[in-house]
Amino acid sequence: MSNHTSALPVAPVVTYKPDRKLVLGALCGMIAAASWGSSFGLARAGTLAGMGPLDFIVLRLLPGAVLALPLVLRRSFLTSGEFVASRAVLLSLCIGPPFVALASGGYLFAPLAHGAVLQPGTMTLSSLVIATLFFGDRLTLQRLAGALAVICGLVLVAGSGIAHAGPQSLIGDAMFASAGLLWATYTALIRRWNISALGGTAMALVVAGIITLPLALASGTFTHLTQFPLSLVLAQLAVQGVISGFLGILFYGWSIRLIGASRATLFAAIVPVVAILLGIPVAGEWPDPAQWLGVGIVTSGLLLGLGVLDPLFRHASPPA
């Protein structure tokens, strides 16, 4: 009798090795989303106080331009091959006055819920399409499912504000969608030109500031801002200009370089979720059950879109 015994099949052991770039890119994306989400409540307060799109353009872009100017001069972008004037202008238009005017002016025609869905939703889907068509990114079933889950979750987060809207909301909807498309274009250009996060952010903000300053002087925006309480103006400068307008864009640029445009854009879609969660301690406003469900769906969509759950799908598939 042979002593040889057939080896029993051993179930494969699923091991997870965290990708350092994925972790860092996701962290940068979360910081960017948190910084943008923190500006929602304050922007709403400014709008109720009487601030308009020109006020927000100045409050958001000029502080960022001032902070970015030393970076541009220190790194000598103006005399290096990394700086191209036409590229800097295009980037500044994507995240500068046109973007801020569309993103804030849409609330003159449509409720907050529309901006919470249409702007990040357009950013997510259009960036996914651009990355697939022009950069050759592989559109996996998990990534597509993640993007669609994010959109569905955002609809739940927005709540009843979508159903109770007047005809004029279509104007605001078009503005929100255009703002989302501008941001997706910025994301694609940063990747296409292989610009560093620091360099691209600095160039875009400085040029945006150069465009904004004469616009503010000609329109009398500085005089208009003196009509508001100093505490409100300073708070807007800190949150809109420094935290959201400078640090948020900087961390978003790093996220693009680390994990790619299609993945980084997913984090912009959780901005309204962050705003809702921050509203609990700040305003004492608790989400309703539908919004909590939306938060969970958005989180699951992010995990799918980032590829965190890909190992589960691979090991769940039967072997060939």
Image: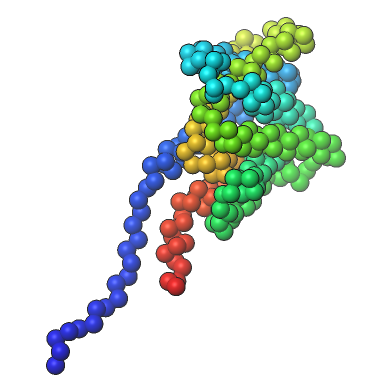
| Residue at position x 57%, y 44% in the image | 262
Q: Position of residue 197 (x, y in %)?
A: 51, 29
| Residue at position x 49%, y 42% in the image | 259
Relative vertical location of residue 143 with respect to residue 88 in this rendering, above or below: below
Which quarter of the figure has residue 214?
Answer: top right
| Residue at position x 74%, y 44% in the image | 162
Quarter of the image with the N terminus is bottom left
| Residue at position x 54%, y 33% in the image | 194
- How many marks on residues? 0
Quarter of the image with the C terminus is bottom left
Along the line of sight, the residue nearer the viewer: 95 or 104: 95
Along the line of sight, the residue nearer the viewer: 246 or 132: 132
Residue 292 visible, this orientation:
no
Q: Position of residue 260 (x, y in %)?
A: 52, 41
Q: Is residue 310 toward the left or the right of residue 46 in the image?
A: left
| Residue projecting furthest to the bottom | 1
Relative vertical location of residue 39 with respect to residue 274 in this rendering, above or below: above
| Residue projecting furthest to the front | 81
Q: Position of residue 49 (x, y in %)?
A: 71, 19
Which quarter of the figure has residue 182?
Answer: top right
Q: Position of residue 184 (x, y in %)?
A: 64, 37
Residue 256 visible, this orientation:
yes
Scheme by which the image is coloured: rainbow
Along the line of sight, the residue nearer the viewer: 256 or 266: 256
Relative vertical location of residue 280 with respect to residue 139 in this rendering, above or below: above
